[in-house]
Amino acid sequence: MAMKTLITNELFLDFIECRYRGYLKITGATEPQSGLLDVSGRLRERYHSQARERLLRAYSDKANQVCTDVGLSVVLANRFDLAIDVTATDANASVRFDALMAAPANARGSQPHYIPIIFVNNEKISTEDELQLALCASTLIRWHACRPSFGRILYGSDFRIRKVKLARALEKADRALEEIRALAERPSQPPLLRLNTHCPTCVFRTNCRATAIEKDDLSLLRGIKEKEIVKLRNKGIFTVTQLSYTFRPRKKSSDPTPESSSTTMLSRPLRFGKSGSMSLESRSWPSRALPYTLTSKERPIMTPTISLVLEFQVPPPSFNDLFGRTSARTKRRSGRTFFKSSQTSRIPS
């Protein structure tokens, strides 16, 4: 016999964040204690209380009908201007509305018309927040109250309000509700296990990760998206090991000179001409920094010097390799060292 599952805001949020976690909640899996969830729950309750008081103060100055902690049927029958903490419960679902605000056509229309509002204690609105708002709108439609085209989200530390269109979000929310009902009817067919960004705050993260490692699941690769996993599965690739065999190394270059690594600099020895201009000869060395200061002989001593930083490993290359292939003679003159070649450079002390 299929297990009867009551759809709530919490179950819906668990499912849209992670289908496998929603499946575990539907099947009645034991939830380990989590201090992080307790803290986040207290923060949500505190923000909910502050947002509630803010709305009540905004509507108390006007001649509006306001109610709190009532059922949806009472709100629809009395057509309140603002209702906070409304609950809609039937045989299939128990959905909580943070607030319901009457639309301008509510008083004069034959049918009541309300705009759903939810409270979010984050500075940014996520896709999951929009889907939770769509769940409230779907409940209003199922109760034959109205079909809202948009809702509002009160969020942030300064209690900003954003208007959210519900056309696309309603479609996604309805599909999620159908999948939840299907899982409740066929609990023997669990959804695929996929690690995602919500795992660090999940109470089942330890068991899920152990199962993923045992199966060598593709979701172990950080950064891979669900669409990419679906494409790989359609190609018959289900594990990280299978995916590793699709790797193709780059073809070796015909150039015999080995490519330098990302940490290797290309150092270019300086060649000075008669006019004082310099040309560069491309040459790569292994990495290690060593500073040199070079001055062209053709220029006066007071001319600015040129500083060059080369990277190479110990032992360093000879100066013949750095400054040309011609032979060099070293002479001592007045405590200074000169290197003579076809193009002479001076290294000041």
Image (spheres, grey):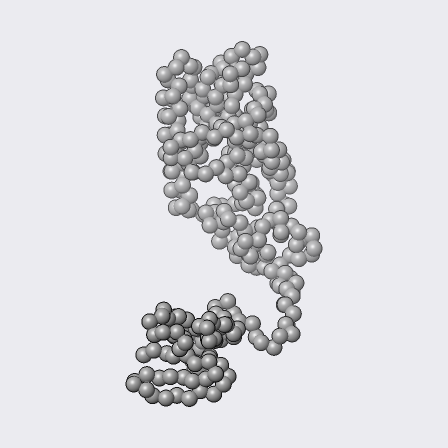
Residue 263 appears in the picture as rendered = yes
Is 134 placed above or below 30 here?
above
Q: Position of residue 11 (x, y in %)?
A: 52, 37
Question: Residue, x 36% and y 30% (percent of image)?
Answer: 50
At x 55% / y 57%, what residue is drawn? 221
Instruction: Name the image quarter holding the C terminus.
Output: bottom left
In this rendering, would 7 be left or right of 339?
Answer: right
Instruction: Report the residue that reaches farthest toward the right.
Output: 235
Residue 318 in the image, given as x and y percentages of width and height: 45, 83
**In the depicted view, which residue is nearer to us: 110 or 217?**
110
- Residue nearest the observer in this picture, 135 or 31: 135
Relative height, residue 126 to residue 324 (above, below): above
Q: Nearer the viewer, residue 311 or 268?
A: 268
Q: Quadrant of residue 242?
A: bottom right
Q: Is residue 93 visible?
A: no
In the picture, the quarter occupied by the N terminus is: top right
How many badges with numbers are in the image?
A: 0
Spot occupied by residue 106 in the image (x, y as percentages of width and height): 52, 15
Task: Give the answer, above or below, for where 11 lies relative to 286.
Answer: above
Q: Given the current orientation, which residue lies at the most extreme left position?
A: 334
Q: Reply above or below: 18 against 281.
A: above
Task: Write the residue at 52% across / 41% down.
Answer: 14
The percent position of residue 190, horizontal first and vertical second, equals 61, 46
Q: Residue at x 59, y 56 (%)?
A: 217
Residue 293 or residue 260, whichever sits in front: 293
